[in-house]
Structure formats: C-alpha cells, structure tokens
Amino acid sequence: MTPVLTSRPTQLNTTVLARLAERWRPVGLYLACLDRDGALLWHDVQMPRALALCLTIESTIPQQIKRLGEAVTANGVRLHGQVPWIQMQLLPLLRRRKVTGWIVLIGRTDQAAALGEDLARFAQRASLDAQALAALANKAPLVPAGLFGPLVRLAENMHEDLQSVTVSHGELANVTEQLTSVYEEIALLSKISSGMRFSQKPQAFLETVCREMQEISDLRSVMVALARRTDEQSEMEFDDVSVVVGDCGVDGAALLRALHEPIHDALAVGETQVHNEIAPDCDWAKLGDHVRRFVCVPLVRDHRTLGVLIAVDKNDTTEFNSVDLKLLNNVGNQCSIFLENAALYHDMQDLFMGVLHALTRSIDAKDAYTRGHSQRVAELSRELARKIGLPDEQCERVYLSGLLHDVGKIGVPETVLTKPGRLTDDEFTAIKKHPAIGAQILGNIRQLQDVIPGVLFHHERWDGHGYPHLLAGENIPLMGRIICVADSFDAMSSTRTYRPALPLETVLAEITRCAGAQFDPALAKIFVSLDFAPYQRAVAETQAATAAASVPLLEKPGGGV
C-alpha cells in the first residue's frame, strides 16, 4: 500500500519538503507530513515501502496525537512513534500557536528479522507474510540508533532555515508585485497628468484615461458619465454623452440606468463604493451574467459632483481589492481635477470669445454696410482652412484671426470708413494702415501672437501689389492668404456705399479671374468649391436684423476700399 498526497493544508509547503527530503535521503532519513489528526498527507516519493507501511498502519500515532490535542504549542513538544525496527519523530506545524499538521522524520534503526513476535504482529496488521515484510524492511537504509537523534535535530534546523528562506522569497515576491503595481499606478497618473490639455474635449481625455485604466487593471469595461443638475431638479442626472471602454454586454445607457441606485448611494456619501457581491433582489441583479462586480467612483471637486467613474469586472474574475480601489480613487481624483479645470478653461474661453465678438461687432457697427462682416469672414476662413486639411486646432486659430482681421479699423476715422464717395489719396492711405494698427493692438496679447499674420497680411496680393509690405506668393503667410480670399468674397457679396451686393455667381467668377494675381491660385480654386448656403443664410439674417433696426442701406455710386 503506497500512500499518496490526499489534501494540502495551508501551512504545508511541499516545495520546501521535497528539497529537504532530497537532502536527508542519503543518510537514511525520510520525510512525510500528516494532518492534525494523524492522516498521511504527503511523503517522500522514494521512501522505502516498509517505512511507508509503518506510517499508514501504526495505530499509536493518531492515538498519541488525539491524546495530546491542542496542548502542543511553540514550546517544542515532540511525539515518538512506537513501531518495531524503526524510529520516527513527529514535529508539529504551528500557526498562531495552534497545530495545523505534523512533519514526520522516519528511519530504520534495527534489523527487522531479529524482532520475532513484534515483526509477526506488525506483518499481520499489514496483511503480509512476516518474511516478506522483513525482506522489505531490510532493504531500507540503516541509521545507527545513536545518530538518529542528532540527525533529527540537524534536519529540524535545516527545515527552519529553508522555511525562513521561503518566507523571505515570498515576502520579496510580494514586495516586487507591490512595487510593480505602484510603478504602473505612478506611470498611469503621470501619463494622465501630462495629457491634461484643458483645451481638448473632455470625452477625448476621459476615453484615454479609461483605456489605460482598463489595460492596467485588466477590467472588462470602464465607463465615465458626466453629471448635470437643473434648477428644477435636486436629484443628480447624467448627460447622454458618456465614455465607455470595453464591453460587458450592456451598453452605457442601460448600465447607467441599471446602476442608478448604487451610483446615487456613492454620490450621496461622496466615497467610492465597491460591490463584490450582488444581492439577487436588487435592481442591478437584472443585468444577469453581464455584470458580476463593479465599483462606483464619484468624481467630486469642492463638494460639486462632476460625474461618476464605473469599473466593471476584472477579467481574472477575482474581487476588487484595496490595490484596485486605491488606483481607481487616484484616477478618479485626476479626472475630477481635469473636469473642473476644463470647465474653468472653457468658461474663460467663452468670456474671451465674448469680448472679441463684442469688439468686432463694435467695429462693424461703425459702418452699417459691414455689419456682420468680421463674423462671416471668420467662418469662411475656417471653412477654407478645413478644406485644405489644416488640423482642427489651427482651423480655430484661423477663425480667430478672421474675426480680428479688421480690428485695426478702430484707429481709422469713422468719417473715412463711412464715406459714401470715392476716397482721396490721404484717406486711402489712412485705410491702408488698419492691418498694421491691428497687429500693434494685438501685439501685447501673448495668447494671440499666432493670429497676427492673418491680421497684418490679409491685404497682401499674390502678385506683390498689396499692402502693407508688398509681399508676394508664398512669402505671404498662409493665414493671410486664406483671409484675403474670404475678406474679398464678403466685400463683393455685401452692399456697400458705392455699389449693391454682387450675385454669388459673379463673385465666384471674379475670385477665379483674380487667381494668381490677387489670390493664391490653389486657395482660390478650392474656395469656389465651398458650400455657400450657410454663408447666404448668415447674410440674410444680418439684413433682416438691419432692417428691423431701421438702418438705411445707401446705394450710391463711387469708389471705395
């Protein structure tokens, strides 16, 4: 009968035992492990069969163990087996001062054939012939009786040393794992912080964060829903637009509805809520197999709720632990900072743009014939910039330059701007100063340095006969060339003191005719292909507003700028 490993207690480290067994075997000492009641759990695979039989048949071992009970503590009590021709010693495995199992050191210390009746009785219990049992026993290495005790003490010391090394290795592995986790967390937070450009859309930033979070924590899905609160409602609601990364089998809106209660519980206390167990009678249990575990992280800043981050299920099916919660909390805090600062940034942008629009409207208002001109030029310039493939951010700067392209007219006398007849040379010279005046006005505003080329050079011509610097061809900055086309188009399409508005077809034909002379030929070709329906609607709205304000539109012949 060969014993086998039938179970494994938490305190049993078979790797350590196997290494010890390999070292003790050459001196005739073999190793086994019993549970707390004396049942065999593990043994050296090369243990002689006669010794293994002693472990499985010897009835005094369980009896001694049961009699001793929990009296064994860390004081070093040992048990000795009472089996013919062998000696064994049992060493307790302790955990929190309680016995969880036994290590057995066993070896043959006498000749089996000389034991007579003891051997016969043991052979009967083993259901073996006495001579066959004696032959098996005599095959086991003989350990001198006087050496058994010292060898046991030496083996015990070796076991303690190996256990200490194993514990140290385990602790080192644990520390390594923790350091790896901390490094990944720091790397993620650093990446999030470095990616905080408040000019970008919140959805783009949050999607990046969710993807990084999903990869590092190995999550099935991560979602962020942004909060909104109306004056009529005290309960928190969420915008329809949310960021969902990964797939848990439920779309973001349905998941948000199903988790309504735990989300609002988390928002109510302002703390992260983890749900590693889902009660069968709760609303979100209806999600079935789609969601097993989830975490709700409130995105809060200065007692103001900005949204909620939801992490759904770990792919390894384990529960969310303290490490996961720490990372989710830190990521949630970074997202809250971003959302708050992004909101402040966009508020400042709105204020900034409001001031600029007010400024350009005040300039346009000086002349009833140019009302809405700056806004229309800005929108046409942005559309042309998009058509030629400029990045979105640069297109917005082109728009801003178009909006401000005539800001220098604030320094031109109103009598010159609104003069119904042909301008004198001195008056035309005054008009030609407005690009340089505009550039000077904007020169001390750091945030507008990149839009100045459009303001300064929008009256330069491709053939070099423009103003103020007589630049030609590609020496004219691209922003100036773009606004030049849009500005001229709107001037021809609008009613002026010296002529009525020209039809769209006539204006486009004029743009084409002047390509290569006044305009960049490549830009002119692309410009005439734009959709001008939005532009015509904007003109009609301006005309209606002007008529409602009873501002007369004079149509007198004569020259102008």
Image (cartoon, rainbow, N blue to C red):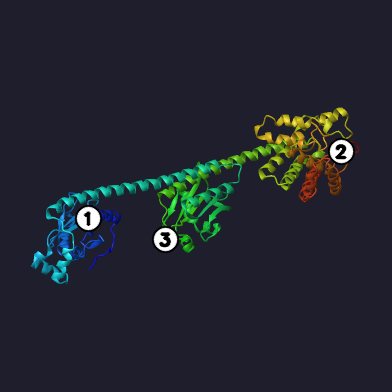
Pointer 2 residue: 497
Instruction: Tell me the residue at 26%/64% (across/down).
Output: 4
Badge 1 density bin: few <14, some 14–19, many ≥20, Cα 10 Å:
few
| Residue 190 as seen in the image, left or right of residue 126 | right
**Which of the two residues, 177 or 133, is positioned nearer the viewer here?**
133
Residue 508 as seen in the image, left or right of residue 390? right
The residue furthest right is: 557
Q: Mark 3, mark 1: which one is toward the viewer?
A: 1
- Residue 542 seen in this snapshot: no
Residue 60 x, y percent position in the rendering: 14, 63
Instruction: Judge depth for marks 1 and 2 and give the one in front.
Output: 1
Q: Is residue 158 above or below residue 560?
A: below
> Which of disc 2 and disc 1 is earlier in sequence?
1
- Dot 2 crowding, Cα within 10 Å, few <14, some 14–19, many 20+: many
Q: Residue furthest top?
A: 426
Query: Distance of mark 1 from mark 2, alpha carbons?
Result: 115 Å
Q: What residue is pinned by disc 3? A: 279
Q: Residues within 10 Å of mark 3 (few under 14, many from 20)?
A: few
In terms of image quadrants, where is residue 141? bottom left
Spatial CA span between label 2 and label 3 = 78 Å
Instruction: Tell me which numbered mark, 2 or 3, is placed earlier along the sequence.
Output: 3
- Please state which of residues 365 and 430 is positioned toward the viewer in this rendering: 430
Point out residue 312 in the picture as x, y percentages from the top left corner. Answer: 48, 56
Quadrant where the N terminus lies?
Answer: bottom left
Kindly identify the amino acid type of the residue bearing the numbered disc 2.
Thr
The residue tagged with tag 1: helix, strand or loop?
helix
Give the vertical position of 198 relative to 234 (above or below): above
Residue 345 disc label? none
Marker disc for residue 26: 1
